[in-house]
Image (cartoon, rainbow, N blue to C red):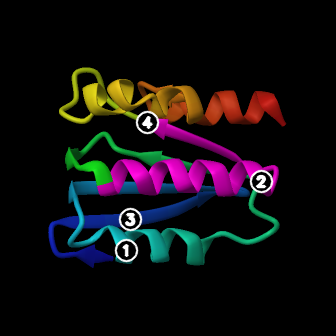
Amino acid sequence: MTHDLAELHEEWHEDTLVARIAGEVDASNVFAIGERLRSLLTNRSIAMIVDLSTTIYLDSAGINLLFSLADEMRAHQQRFALVVADPSPVRRMIVVTGLDRVAPMHGSLDEAAGVIRRAM
C-alpha cells in the first residue's frame, strides 16, 4: 500500500504482523499509515513488528503514531517492537524521544522476531 511519500508492506509470521515502511512518514501520510496498521490487527494478533530499516524520514507525527501503537498494543497484552538499522536516519530520533524505552528496538527482523517468540 502506498501513502504518497511512504510504502507500507505487510506480511504475517504466524500471529505476528510485520509492517515494513519504506520512505518518509510525516503529517501528510501518518493518518493513513496508522489506519492501515490498526486495521490489520485483531484480538488474536500476538505482536506487531514495525520495520523501519528503509524509512528515511520520521517526523514527530510518525513518532507519536509509534508511541500510540505501542500503548494500544500493551493495553491489549500484545507485543510491539521496532526494527531500525544501524546506522539509520531515524535511529537518533527514536532514541532522543525515548521511544526505544517504550518499544524495544532491534537491528534486524530476525532479532525482533526471536525476542517475541521467546517471550511467548
| Position of 70 relative to 39 (above/below) | above
Assess whether mark 2 and mark 4 are in contact (beta carbons under 8 angstroms).
no
**How far from the left and from the top, in percent, is residue 80?**
62, 44
Residue span colored magenta:
61-82
Determine contact: label 1, label 4, CB under 8 Å: no
The amino acid marked with disc number 4 is Val
Instruction: Return the mark for residue 83.
Output: 4
Q: Residue at x 67, y 57 (%)?
A: 72
Q: Which residue is mark 3?
A: 9
Marks 2/3 in contact by CB < 8 Å: the verdict is no
Distance from Cα at disc 1 to Cα at disc 3: 16 Å
Gap in angstroms between the C-alphas marked 4 and 3? 14 Å
Single out the mark in the foreground, 2 or 3: 2
Label 2 Cα crowd, 10 Å radius (few <14 / some 14-19 / many 20+): few
Going from N to C along the chain, the mark reached first, 2 or 3, is: 3
Q: Nearer the viewer, residue 108 or 43?
A: 43
